Amino acid sequence: MTEVTIQDLIKTAIRAEELGINFYSELSKRFYKFEELKQTLELLAKDEVEHKRQFTELLSDVGEDKYEISEEDRDFLKGVDISKFFEGMETIGANVKPISILTKAYAFEKESVLYYIGIRDVVGKNPKLDQIIKIEKSHVTKLMKYILDESKFRGLSDEWI
């Protein structure tokens, strides 16, 4: 990550939220037969809309200000760069199974929390960012519980696998 700015980091977060909106919305339509899963995906999409708005406000708040990004923070943000998920979120295979989607969503949400904490390390305490991180953490927890509860004791012939 060479010569990255806080504005670049926030723009990546905005792009992630846009992809999250599309990803979860598309999947909620595709998995309409699984009512609880559909509702979970719709909730995630709705939350991502709000996060996009909050990050857009945060981008405006930081304006053109220069923030010093330490080498340690740059290395951390490089390690948790959420853009590595973008390609997989733009195209969703026709035969994808719900458990695969939940696993992918869980990984994305978990990595988003780390990335957003990295942004907070650069800009300092920020109520908007703290709120986003709190909700993203709840996404991780809900997805983890859903994966564990709903996939328990399922066999290879189950359409979830």
Image (cartoon, rainbow, N blue to C red):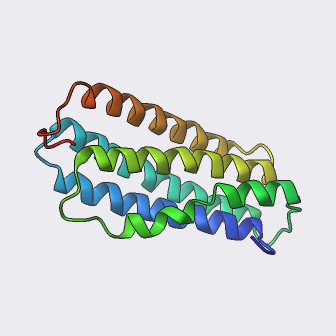
Q: Is residue 116 above or below residue 57?
A: above
In the rendered image, residue 79, in percent from the top left (x then y), is placed at: 68, 56
> Farthest residue toward the front?
156
Frontmost residue, 134 versus 112: 112
Frontmost residue, 95 versus 64: 95
Quarter holding the N terminus is bottom right
Frontmost residue, 93 versus 116: 93
Q: Which residue does the image show at 33% across and 31% down from the upper left?
A: 146
Q: Is residue 90 above or below residue 43?
A: below
In the rendered image, residue 143, in percent from the top left (x then y), is placed at: 39, 36
In the rendered image, residue 65, in percent from the top left (x then y), is placed at: 83, 68
In this rendering, would 72 be left or right of 120? right
In this rendering, would 7 be left or right of 132? right
In this rendering, would 93 be left or right of 141? left
In this rendering, would 49 be left or right of 5? left
Figure disc tally: 0
Q: Which residue does the image show at 66% across and 58% down from the upper left?
A: 58
Q: Which residue does the image show at 33% across and 34% down from the upper left?
A: 147
Quarter of image, res 122: bottom right
Quarter holding the C terminus is top left
Frontmost residue, 100 versus 121: 100
In the rendered image, residue 125, in percent from the top left (x then y), is placed at: 77, 43
Q: Which residue does the image show at 73% across and 45% down from the upper left?
A: 126
